[in-house]
């Protein structure tokens, strides 16, 4: 009899001992649901993973030992007592039923690890969520996926690169996975709405964060897929985002970092991808732009340098990707107003301009297109910033931030 830990053990892919690895391989096989599995067993699975101190690894051990969630639930209080945890109670059935009803109201459905439509790549990642809630096109989970992540405070060049990569890779038959954050994530989702995009949420499917992406989330639910392991009604906290990132990495065959600071969630996703044996790629940036520091560091450490979608496709292959032959032509540099920039110390249009400019020169006309604002208003704001010593004009109408 093994004891219930205070916190879940390390995920399976981190174990080096052969016997332990073999145990977890056997444990994963417990997720093959029998053909006669009824709704009661699926409710029991949800109750088991929602029970106190039961993480992914503990869930796996319980399922491997008891072979059904119902039996594991019955054994759990005694296991807790043996571990010195008194008065342990499992997740009550009404709580699980309330979550299922909330999912039904939202138009979401439960996908259990071991189900035929559970994504194979995520199941093999070693730390796969036992339960996923899915809203939208679950068929996208069967297609080849690539993760595209980056900073919330994207530069104009980073934003264009994210849109172009997402659109081109989508046209080539790949589903784009990201985390629905502002900045690079949101731009990648927007550019791949028509070809296939999956947004992994850090909270419940009914708790969209940030709130500014609520409309985008609604579009993804219609044309793409919203995915979360968290219960409905749960608002994301800081500790939930790394768990979200492991799903983003686990779904994709490769993680592409467009812009990221040296300490950022995007680099956490890249590290998780490396641990899972995924390919990590990065778009290079100006060495003096802090938003490019993380990507440049990844390239220095061996990540594949990405110039365009062709570099990604060459590295990942396209054997099972189906190009969209009927896709209407996409104007790659067409003006598409960016999502609102994150809160900035400067307000209004001046703040939006500073958020887009970096140390790499940007043409003024391109800045106007990216902002989607009247040229006269942009020109006035630029004049104010130039007089304040915040920006510098170079030859050919190029702008840089000081």
Image (tube, helix red, strand yellow):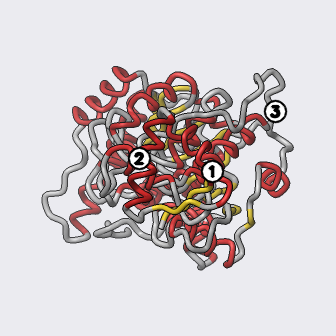
Q: Is residue 39 left or right of residue 159?
A: left
Image quadrant where residue 276 sits: bottom right
Image quadrant where residue 104 sits: top left
Q: Can I make out residue 61 in this image?
A: yes
Q: Which residue is mark 2?
A: 381
Q: Earlier in the sequence, mark 3 or mark 2?
A: 3
Tell me the residue at 33%/54% (across/down). Answer: 344
> Where residue 28 sits: x, y (%)?
57, 54
Q: Is residue 365 left or right of residue 128?
A: right
Q: Secondary structure at mark 2?
A: helix
Q: Earlier in the sequence, mark 3 or mark 1?
A: 3
Q: Which mark is residue 323?
A: 3
In this rendered view, identify the residue nearer to me: 139 or 21: 139
Q: Which residue is mark 1?
A: 363
Which quadrant is the N terminus positioned in? bottom left
Q: Note whether 321 is above or below 248 in the view shown.
A: above
Report crowding for label 1: few under 14, some 14 to 19, many 20 or more residues within 10 A (C-alpha): some
């Amino acid at each position: 009899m093994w004891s219930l830990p205070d916190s879940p053990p390390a995920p399976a892919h981190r174990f080096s001992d052969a016997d332990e690895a073999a145990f977890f391989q056997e444990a994963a096989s417990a997720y093959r649901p029998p053909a006669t599995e009824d709704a009661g067993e699926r409710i029991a699975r949800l109750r088991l993973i929602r029970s106190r101190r039961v993480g992914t690894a503990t869930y796996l051990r319980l399922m491997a030992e008891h072979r059904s969630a119902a039996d594991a639930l019955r054994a759990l209080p005694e296991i807790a007592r043996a571990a010195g945890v008194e008065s342990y109670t499992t997740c009550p059935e009404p709580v699980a039923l309330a979550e299922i009803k909330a999912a039904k109201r939202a138009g979401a459905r439960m996908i259990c690890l071991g189900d035929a439509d559970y994504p194979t790549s995520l199941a093999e990642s070693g730390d796969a969520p036992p339960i996923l809630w899915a809203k939208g096109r679950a068929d996208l989970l069967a297609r080849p996926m690539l993760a595209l992540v980056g900073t919330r405070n994207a530069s104009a060049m980073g934003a264009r690169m994210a849109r172009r990569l997402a659109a081109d890779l989508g046209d080539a038959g790949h589903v784009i996975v990201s985390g629905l954050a502002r900045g690079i994530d949101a731009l990648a989702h927007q550019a791949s709405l028509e070809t296939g995009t999956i947004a992994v949420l850090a909270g419940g499917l009914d708790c969209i964060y940030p709130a500014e992406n609520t409309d985008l989330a609604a579009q993804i639910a219609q044309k793409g897929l919203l995915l979360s392991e968290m219960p409905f009604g749960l608002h994301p906290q800081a500790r939930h985002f790394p768990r979200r990132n492991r799903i983003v990495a686990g779904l994709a065959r490769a993680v592409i970092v467009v812009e990221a600071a040296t300490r950022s969630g995007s680099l956490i996703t890249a590290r998780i991808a490396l641990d899972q044996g995924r390919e990590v790629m990065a778009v290079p940036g100006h060495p003096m732009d802090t938003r490019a520091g993380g990507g440049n560091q990844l390239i220095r450490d061996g990540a594949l340098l990405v110039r365009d979608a062709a570099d990604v496709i060459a590295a990942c292959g396209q054997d099972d990707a189906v190009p969209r032959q009927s896709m209407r032509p996409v104007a790659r540099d067409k003006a598409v107003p960016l999502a609102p920039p994150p809160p900035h110390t400067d307000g209004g249009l001046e703040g939006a301009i500073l958020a887009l400019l970096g140390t790499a020169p940007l043409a003024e006309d391109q800045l106007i297109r990216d902002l989607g604002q009247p040229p006269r208003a942009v020109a006035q704001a630029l004049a104010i910033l130039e007089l304040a010593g915040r920006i510098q004009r170079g030859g050919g109408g190029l702008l840089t931030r000081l």
